[in-house]
Amino acid sequence: MNIGIIGLGLMGGSLGLTLKKFPKKYTIIGYDHNKEHQKEALKLQLVDTISNDFEEIKKCDVIILTIPVDAIIKTTQNLQDVSSACTIIDFGSSKEKIDSSIPESIRANFVTAHPMTGTEKFGPSAAIEELYKDHTMVICNQEKSALRQKEIALGIFKDIGSKVVFMGAKEHDQHAAFISHMPHTVSYAIANSVMKQEDPQSIIALAGGGFRSMSRIAKSSPSMWEDIFRQNKKNLLKSIDSFNQQMSLCQQLIEEENWDELHQWMENANALHDIL
């Protein structure tokens, strides 16, 4: 099975690296506009070959889009003449706009998915062989995918070790705003609040594990996350508003020296880890 991976950064590179463990089952063809990414992906053996011909990628048995969400929407418009047997999978972090933008003529070819994994690093050198192992893969609006395409996607997800969950694209975006997108805004805000201090270096010199954990994802690609924030704007704003209400409550309890209620507020938050 020939698999064309469009986008050879963290997600695409990690996917290629994992699938190359099955050389008798898959041949991995990489496609990326960035020439340095192409060279790096070959050097790191993330793919079997590189193609600069989009028409060649369109002839693959499976095409996987591991590129920013706006680029996914643009690319879908150039895939309208693929074979009816072709399986197209996107790994976009927001789903509703992507789903609605897929041309009807190839909607059955598509499996819209979101791997709930990643790091703050990007580019081919960030690739991790077990990035997807034991992490959730959300498949959205599965009823719109043809049975053949869904079975092929499920086989690939099984091989990379993902745990599959099904839900609607609208529901996904509502949940992703709280558990993925809003936390990125918080991390960016923490980083910016420190950098605007008179002597950020002195603060950073004192930084322990907590600060590093909270600010880690602020190193994520601004280009990629700008696209995600734009596509999921409505849900993201709701999640930010919810977060701001909690921050305001915390501030109020401290100002009023209401330590008992503050303690209970913290205990309520502790309960989250009973679920995770």
Image (cartoon, helix red, strand yellow):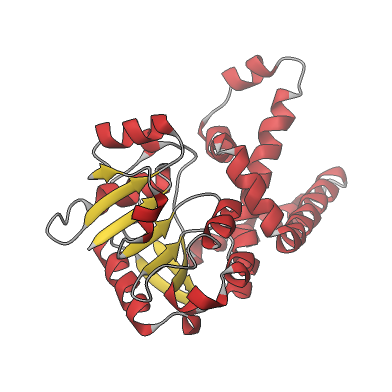
Q: Is residue 179 visible?
A: yes
Residue extending farthest to the right is: 256
Check the image and report above or below for 110 versus 159. below
Q: Position of residue 31 (x, y in %)?
A: 38, 46
Say which quarter of the image contains residue 212.
top right
Tell me where residue 194 appears, x and y as whole percent: 70, 27
Q: Percent from the top left, x then y, of residue 100?
A: 62, 72
Relative to 150, is 209 on the left or the right? right
Left or right: 128 in relation to 225 = left
Q: Which residue shows up at 33% across the image and 31% down it?
A: 40
Q: Quadrant of the N terminus?
A: bottom left
Q: Describe residue 144's horizontal placement relative to residue 26 as left or right.
A: right
Residue placed at 87% from the left, 47% from the top?
256
| Point 71% across, 63% down: residue | 235
The answer to whether residue 130 shows anywhere in this view is no
Where is residue 42? Give x, y as percent.
Answer: 27, 36
Between 82 and 112, the residue placed more toward the observer is 82
**Which residue is painted at 65% across and 68% down in the image?**
174
Counting every numbered tag in the picture gives 0
Q: Is residue 189 above or below residue 242?
A: above
In the picture, measured across the screen, residue 260 lies left or right of residue 213, that is right
Above-or-below relation of 202 to 217:
above
